[in-house]
Image (cartoon, rainbow, N blue to C red):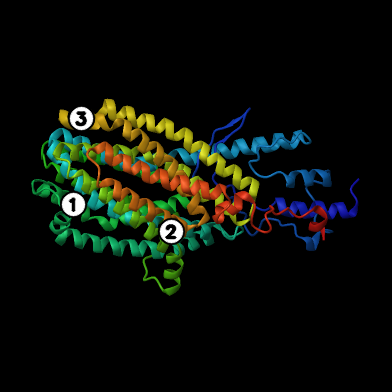
Amino acid sequence: AATSNDKQLLNRHNSFTMKPLALSSFALLITANDWHVTAAFVGQFQPRISSSSPSYSHHDHGTRQSPIPSASVASIRNRRSRPLFSTSKDDTSNNDDETDNSSNNSSKREMLKFAIPALGIYLTNPLLSNIDNAFVGRTVGAMGLAALSPATLCIDQALYLFSFLSRATTGLASRAYTSPSNASEEEAKCKLKDAASPALSISLFCGAVMSILYAFFTPNILNALQVDPLLHTSATSYIHWRGAISAAAMAQSILLSLFMVAKDAKTPLKIIASTALLNVVGDALLCAWPLRMGCGGAAAATAAATLFSTGWMVAALKRKGMMPKLKVPNAKDCRELLSFTGPLLAIQLTRMVGFMNMQRTAMTLGLESLAGYQLCMNLMIFFILFGEPLSQLGQTKLPSLIDSNKTEEAMATFKSILTLSTFAAVGVGAAAYFTTLFGSGLFSSNLAVQAVAKVTAPTLFFAVSQTIVGIAVDGAMMASRDFGFMLATGLGSFVLQSTLLTHCKSVGDIFSTFTVRLGTYALLSVGRALLGYGNLGRAIRGRRGGGKEREPPSIAQEAA
């Protein structure tokens, strides 16, 4: 029979366990006897408890009756001492283990239901780019494929530059949506809309400015990039069509972040899949037959599909009560947004300029080499996005572990990310290699372009493999918010790549410089963390707070 003190402890424990438990994204934990196959996702699975739900506080221990009167203090201690998703074996409580395993299996199923659609969303846009390449390459030839190279550089790299807005939206909106944990659904949605409103407003403004620049200064941009005059007409047509809807394209990334924060991947996947079908039909009609508009037709089809998907997302968010209102950001909004966007913008700039330097080097190698570079670049972008869930895993799982200095769990999660990325790098790199080697004919009928792609296939394997690891490490570094080191390392690797590009004589050499750049960044970041430096390093090595992991309060301390 439990004593009166024990009953108070049990009621105290009940108050603790009745609160909602947030499950963040998780890793593939590989052990000697067990494979926990999981996936990463953006957001948190967190049940919301209404204000009418019963609560058990320390003020009414004598009046509230514990729903677990038969539990013992020892079993409570055992339950509280085991970390979530722990791989250690605890033979002292088989029943607890069975309950935990059942709960973990259920949570894994829920996470997989989110992760698989989310991966489909990430892969759709690069897949559409490859479809555009296929239509242009088969209908226009090497000239059209070569024109797409500088054209997509002007459009896609600009969108990549402004991707810091969507990343900031994910961070700000997820914190607003899940805090406090006892907030009602309507209150959470209002906070989410307020958090996302400044980023959405800024993205629309920036998109409008970009459209004006494309409309009046495209020839100047192409001249600055030293594009072959023979390619100007096709490239200009593509840029004008895609550039006209820049505001919709930028806003779409913000809206997509809101679906992810709300743990809804199925709605945007349905929208993106329908958009992909529309884009393919548009490519067939505008690029192939009957209009035969070439590069301009492919761009027009993509622009129409983007407008369609953005409008659908707006309607879906309005039905859910999650559509942010447009407003002029005030000083507080700007400061909060700049805490994320300032460092990320600088980092994105160095990476974008690196891609531009690769592009400019490819344009000096001749028409067929430029077309082959465009083919290989689009394939690389498609395959490296398989590493994005690993980045999201680090960004969603590690921050809480770093902030609370949970050394063992942080180290286990970081090791799991590195293990996952290594296996993924080999598998995805091999897929990129064989696709480039045997599938280049799907994207171009020109034998010279196909030959360039086949020769580049081995180099592309290493580029994709190293990038998968780099993306995973990058997510962990972003979780630690160690932006200073990321920027310094990015600048150093950028200078190294720029120097190597001056000696490139082939498309394979260009991709080799990219491999060296990403490899240098990943190696320095991992080495620094394992040596115990930076926020991540101090967390996984236990150097914060005297070098020891914080111990959870004892049952006696909690009772006091």
- In the displayed structure, 270 sits above or below 65; it is above
Looking at marks 3 and 2 on the same chain, the residue that comes earlier in the sequence is marked by 2
Q: CA distance from mark 3 to mark 2?
A: 40 Å
Label 2, on which residue? 168
Looking at marks 2 and 1 on the same chain, the residue that comes earlier in the sequence is marked by 2
Q: Amino acid at mark 3?
A: Gln
Q: Of circles 3 and 2, which is in front? A: 3
For disc 1, the neighbor class at 10 Å (few under 14, some 14 to 19, many from 20) is: many
What residue do we see at 71% from left, 43% from top? 82
For disc 2, the neighbor class at 10 Å (few under 14, some 14 to 19, many from 20) is: many
Looking at marks 1 and 3 on the same chain, the residue that comes earlier in the sequence is marked by 1
Residue 252 appearing in the image = no
Residue 445 occupies quadrant: top left
Q: Nearer the viewer, residue 395 or 347?
A: 347
Q: Is residue 240 left or right of residue 180?
A: left
Would you say the residues marked 1 and 3 are in contact, meaning their CB atoms lie under 8 Å apart?
no
What residue do we see at 11% from left, 47% from top? 228
Q: Is residue 122 left or right of residue 261?
A: left
- In the displayed structure, 531 sits above or below 281; it is below
* x then y, percent, for residue 132: 22, 39
Q: Nearer the viewer, residue 370 or 61?
A: 370
For disc 3, the neighbor class at 10 Å (few under 14, some 14 to 19, many from 20) is: many
Label 3, on which residue? 450
What residue do we see at 8% from left, 46% from top? 230
The extreme bottom residue here reads: 331
* x then y, percent, for residue 160: 32, 52
Tell me the number on the disc at residue 239.
1
* x then y, percent, for residue 149: 20, 44
Q: CA distance from mark 2 to mark 1?
A: 27 Å
Q: Amino acid at mark 1?
A: Ile
Q: Nearer the viewer, residue 40 or 492?
A: 492
